[in-house]
Image: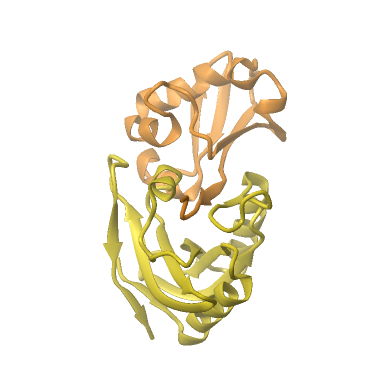
Amino acid sequence: MSVTIQIPTALRTYSDGNAAVEVSGTTVREALDALTTTHTGLQRHLRTDSGALRSFVNVYLNDEDIRYLGKEDTAVADGDTLTIVPSIAGGVGS
Amino acid sequence: MTVRFARAEYQRMHAAAAEGYPHEVVGILAGSRSTGDVTEVVPLVNERADSPRNRYRVSGLVMMRAEQSVEARGLEVVGYYHSHPDHPARYSEYDRDHALPNMSYVIVSVREGVPGDTLSWRLVEDRSSMDAEPVEIV
């Protein structure tokens, strides 16, 4: 399946400046893995060392948050759009 | 990169930090990414109502809409600001762990309700730390 992944501003230096990248995959995971295989600089900012998506990385399949679908196992169809939408978080902590 | 605040916007950011004390406040710094000029400070709502004294969060959809609004006005997102109530303006490990690359993270230290030290930080490439950036008021 051919899927378009929308890249947020903060990560476009790793997509050669492109706001969107076309990839192939049958699930969200396959599509994101295809993205990071061809754009390796994205890997460390999208995923933790254990391979999970970082907590501030939100992924929408068309208009739906994948957390409310099948998460990264969600199937994608030809022409679907995945949008990476970072939240922001932080704080002094202690 | 040097973060260059328009004076009125720097003062607005400090005023927001003071008004929000003792909670952390957060917002977008809008302007020009190529020059580091911040011409508009955009306050956002801190969604960490459970722990606002030491945490902030703005969810993805809210961020997306806010950033689209910034871009519709012909501006770019230069970075984000937040406040540290009664703590230094240095980034915490939690700040670093949640930081995005290629953005300026301005932190305002607010001591007993009074904004003071204001520092900017940028995530290094391997995410292990954040480098200090100069802050100017123009």
What residue is at 38 percent from the left and 30 percent from the top?
A43
Q: Against A22, is B131 above or below?
A: below
Identify whether A36 is placed above or below B104: above
Residue drawn 53% across and 16% down? A25
Question: Which chain identifier belongs to the yellow chain?
Answer: B
- Quadrant location of residue A85? top right
Whether residue B5 is situated above or below residue B97 in the rendered picture: below
Looking at the picture, the colour scheme in use is by chain
**Chain letter, colour orange:** A
* Residue B100 in the image: above or below residue A28: below
Q: Nearer the viewer, residue B13 or A69?
A: B13
Q: Is residue B137 left or right of residue B30?
A: left
Image point (36%, 46%), residue name: A13
How many numbered dots are placed on residues in this image?
Answer: 0
Q: Residue at x 29, y 47 (%)?
A: B129
- Image quadrant assignment for residue A64: top right
Residue A81 appears at what percent x and percent y?
Answer: 62, 31
Question: Residue B83 placed where, x, y %?
Answer: 50, 65
The image position of residue A16, as x and y in percent, is 36, 42
Locate the N terminus of chain B by quadrant. bottom left
Residue B84: x percent and y percent? 48, 64
Q: Quadrant of the C terminus of chain B?
A: bottom left
